[in-house]
Structure formats: structure tokens, C-alpha cells
């Protein structure tokens, strides 16, 4: 038996128009897997006439999406999505959870990509401080699992310890872009905002010519991360304290410039950097019998 749903959504301001057609296997018994396909037609609108000033950016796009979740064995979990955009001609993979679970000395261990609630505030507001976000569609960001070894240990009196150790880091990735022969950023994604083409210096308009320096991929991906969380529940009140020393999920750009005033030209060489930071969160909250939650 298949379930079909038709959803019509109209966005506001810089919004979208989308139609979903989904098919999901379902029977009277709970299936250990789910496969959902969606076909969407997007139309972006904006009050700013310059929003689609680039001829390469189309205000219409067809989106093919596939969501797959498999949990047949309690020791495995696969939860991922694939999205193809005809307007951008791009393939995108969203890795929510892909891990293998074992138990060692009363400690649950997870190997792979796994999401965890390090911070309620970061999870609700989607700031991307703790876990990277799937940022292909900025209207609907989703958190992704962090890659590494996850350790979870429960103690008496509702205490819990959670540790993440990872030798790798996979940062967030946004819309795809390139630089054309004229030294200007180009992208088929309406979410990409290119840097300025000109700069005013000494009352003159200087044209910027951009180039990209290849990043050290091994250094960026091979950056270790560590995170730890202690949480407790007492008489309906929950609290947690989390700390991490890890690379930021966002790639930080850096640039070097060379100015040639006689020709009104500025050569800008851009380079991607991955920076470390310390992050800590202390939260206290309660969950009522209904759906209400309060956290601070």
C-alpha cells in the first residue's frame, strides 16, 4: 500500500512555490525502512528586482528528492537524503545518521555520523554552532550528524555522560559556485550572494578580479574534534552542561589583495580556512505532560 500526499506551499517575500508527491511503503506492520520520493517545482520571488540580476540564476527549478531510512537491525541506522536540482544541475547528499552501534562495558558506542542534542537552543534556532547544517536550501536548514566515535554512559539517579571523539571534520557546504574568465563569482543558486564586483578607493571605482586558492583538503578534513556533555534529570527538571574544542562548522574565507591604481584593478585571491573554537553550553529546562517545554 502506498500513501500519496499533495502539498501546496506558498512562500512569503523571498519565497517559493512547491508541490510534493510522496510515496511511502506502508502496511499494518511497522516497516524497518522507509523510502520517500518527492518532486517539487520551485518558483522564487522577491520584491528586489536585482535578486535575479544574474542571467545564470533561474527563478524556477525542479527538485527531485529521495529520503531513505533503514533500521532493520538495532545496531545499525541509516538516515539520509539525496536531492537533485535541475536549475542548479547539482547533486546534494544530506547525511543525518549513519552509524553502527555496539556496547562495551555498559557503555553505548556509536561509530559514524550521529546527531545528538548538544544544545536545545542551537537545535531550535539552527545556528550551526555544535552540529553542521545541511544548507543547500536556506529556508529549511537541517542539522547533520557529526562524524566520529560517540560514547554514551548512563549512571544511577538519571545521570548521563556523552563523549564525542573524532579525527575528522566535515564542515558545512552551501551553494556551489565558480569563477568565470572575467574573474567574477558565478552560481546558478539563488541563495548565493557574490562579493562586490567593484570597490571605491580614493574616490575611484576599482574593479575586483577574483581567484581561488586550492585549500589544503587533508588539513581541513583531518582536523580532530572533542566534545563532552553531562546531563541529569531531577524531579522533572532537566539540565545539561556541554563543552567542545573543535573546528567551526562554517568555512571562514580569507583574502589577499593586490591593487593596481593606474588600471583601476584589484586582484583578490580568496582562500578557505577552518578555524578552531571553544564552545560551552549550560541549559536548564522542564518538559510538561503535554507538548510544552521551557528551557533557559
Image (cartoon, rainbow, N blue to C red):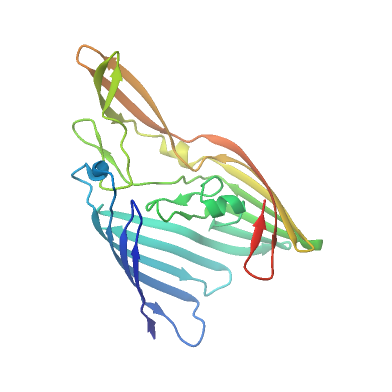
- Quarter of the picture containing the N terminus is bottom left
Q: Is residue 160 visible?
A: no
Expressed as whole percent of the image width and height from the top left, the position of residue 2 reads 38, 82
Q: Nearer the viewer, residue 237 or 265?
A: 237
Residue at 40% in and 51% down? 138
Residue at 63% in and 46% down? 227
Q: Nearer the viewer, residue 173 or 48?
A: 48
Left or right: 106 with respect to 150? right
Expressed as whole percent of the image width and height from the top left, the position of residue 181 reads 18, 33
Residue at 49% in and 55% down? 144
* The quadrant where residue 262 appears: top left
Image vertical order of residue 124 relative to residue 67, above or below: above
Expressed as whole percent of the image width and height from the top left, the position of residue 272 reads 40, 34
Left or right: 179 with respect to 8? left
Count every numbered label the image shows and give the total. 0
Q: Is residue 275 visible?
A: yes
Expressed as whole percent of the image width and height from the top left, the position of residue 61 reads 25, 58
Residue at 19% in and 31% down? 182
Residue that sits furthest to the bottom in the current view: 28
Image vertical order of residue 257 relative to residue 186, above or below: above
Residue that sits furthest to the right in the current view: 157
Amino acid at each position: 500500500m502506498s500513501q500519496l500526499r499533495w502539498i501546496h506551499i506558498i512562500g512569503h517575500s523571498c519565497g517559493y512555490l512547491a508541490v510534493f508527491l510522496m510515496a511511502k511503503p506502508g502496511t499494518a506492520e511497522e516497516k524497518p525502512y522507509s523510502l520517500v520520493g518527492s518532486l517539487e517545482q520551485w518558483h522564487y520571488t522577491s520584491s528586489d528586482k536585482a535578486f535575479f540580476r544574474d542571467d545564470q540564476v533561474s527563478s524556477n527549478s525542479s527538485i527531485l528528492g529521495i529520503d531513505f531510512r533503514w533500521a532493520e537491525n538495532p545496531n545499525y541506522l541509516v538516515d539520509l537524503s539525496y536531492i537533485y536540482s535541475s536549475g542548479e544541475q547539482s547533486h546534494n547528499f544530506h547525511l543525518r545518521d549513519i552509524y553502527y552501534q555496539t556496547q562495551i562495558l555498559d557503555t553505548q558506542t556509536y561509530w559514524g555520523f550521529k546527531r545528538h542534542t548538544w544544545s536545545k537552543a542551537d537545535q531550535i534556532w539552527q545556528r550551526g554552532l555544535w552540529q553542521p547544517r545541511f544548507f543547500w536550501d536556506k529556508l529549511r536548514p537541517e542539522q547533520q550528524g557529526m562524524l566520529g566515535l560517540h560514547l554514551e554512559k548512563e549512571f544511577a539517579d538519571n545521570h548521563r555522560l556523552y563523549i564525542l571523539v573524532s579525527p575528522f571534520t566535515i564542515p558545512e557546504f552551501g551553494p556551489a559556485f565558480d569563477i568565470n574568465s572575467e574573474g567574477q563569482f558565478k552560481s546558478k543558486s539563488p541563495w548565493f550572494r557574490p562579493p562586490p564586483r567593484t570597490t571605491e578607493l580614493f574616490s575611484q571605482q576599482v574593479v575586483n578580479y577574483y581567484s581561488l586558492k586550492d585549500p589544503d583538503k587533508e588539513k581541513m578534513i583531518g582536523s580532530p574534534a572533542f566534545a563532552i556533555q553531562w546531563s541529569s534529570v531531577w524531579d522533572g527538571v532537566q539540565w545539561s552542561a556541554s563543552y567542545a574544542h573543535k573546528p567551526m562548522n562554517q568555512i571562514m574565507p580569507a583574502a589577499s589583495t593586490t591593487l593596481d591604481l593606474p588600471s583601476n584593478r584589484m586582484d583578490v585571491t580568496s582562500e578557505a580556512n577552518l578555524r578552531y573554537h571553544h564552545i560551552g553550553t549550560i541549559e536548564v529546562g522542564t518538559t510538561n505532560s503535554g507538548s510544552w517545554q521551557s528551557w533557559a
